[in-house]
Amino acid sequence: DVKNFTNEDALNHFIKYGITEGRICSKMSYRKEFIECLHFDKNSSVLEIGPFNNPIFTGNNVKYFDVLNSDDLRARSKNIGLDTTRTPDVIHFVDPYGDLSIVNEKFDLVITSHAIEHQPDLISFLINIEKLLNIGGIAAFIVPDKRYCFDHYNSTSNIFEVLSSHISKDKKHSLYKFFLHRLNTIHNNPVRHWQKDHGKLKLNKEKLL
């Protein structure tokens, strides 16, 4: 329906309709193409944050950071029905609070996939990543679209919440945020979300009023 659009018409159409509909307009929206666009040497040093059971990178030049060690990650994957075969054999840096300051090396690339949105203190997280980069290094983030995942009903954080968590030096999420997450989390099927089938909340919040 847009094949005869000029470039300007196509851009305007995407701005007006495509963004709100969650349409993909760039190859970088796909993980494989995004990784290829990073343009780093195959021998570059890499730190992957939060590989869980499906790391993006493997090899002798890659190290991993997570809140659990390899055995615990494998057990958690098995417990929730995920494939455990690609879980890294070694998690080089482990901190239960996700504190990157324990990492005592620098890297050419620091990458996270679906991890940045879980940080209690976003600002400290970004500051620590900057400290881990070699000169000219790259920080890369793969972030889910909340409209098409289990976070559909969860509200986005505002700048005041981000600043407050940083000033308070939060190491973990508050009980308030924990309960909101548990009450608002629904299915993780992007196709169903695209079809406006977001599922029902686990608890009718009106009953809490």
Image (spheres, rainbow, N blue to C red):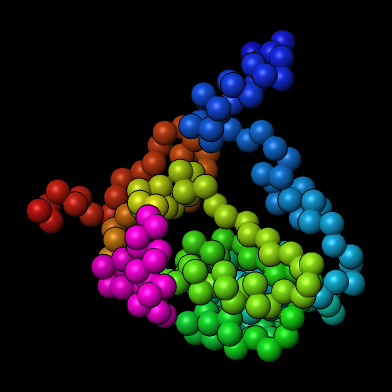
Assign the N terminus to one quadrant of the image.
top right
Query: Which of 73/112 is in front?
Result: 112
- Provide residue 47's location: percent of width, then percent of height: 72, 75
Residue drawn at 60 percent across, 88 percent down: 102
Identify the residue at image location x=52%, y=24%: 17
Residue 75 visible? The answer is: no
Q: Residue 119: where, in percent of width, then height? A: 47, 69
Can residue 98 be seen from the camera position used here? yes
146 up-or-down from 2: above or below: below
Q: Nearer the viewer, residue 187 or 98?
A: 98
Magenta residues, start to end = 158-178
Q: Quadrant of residue 107?
A: bottom right
Quadrant hosting residue 95: bottom right
Main SS of the magenta part reads helix
Does 139 appear above or below 59? above
Residue at x-position 50% and y-position 31%? 21
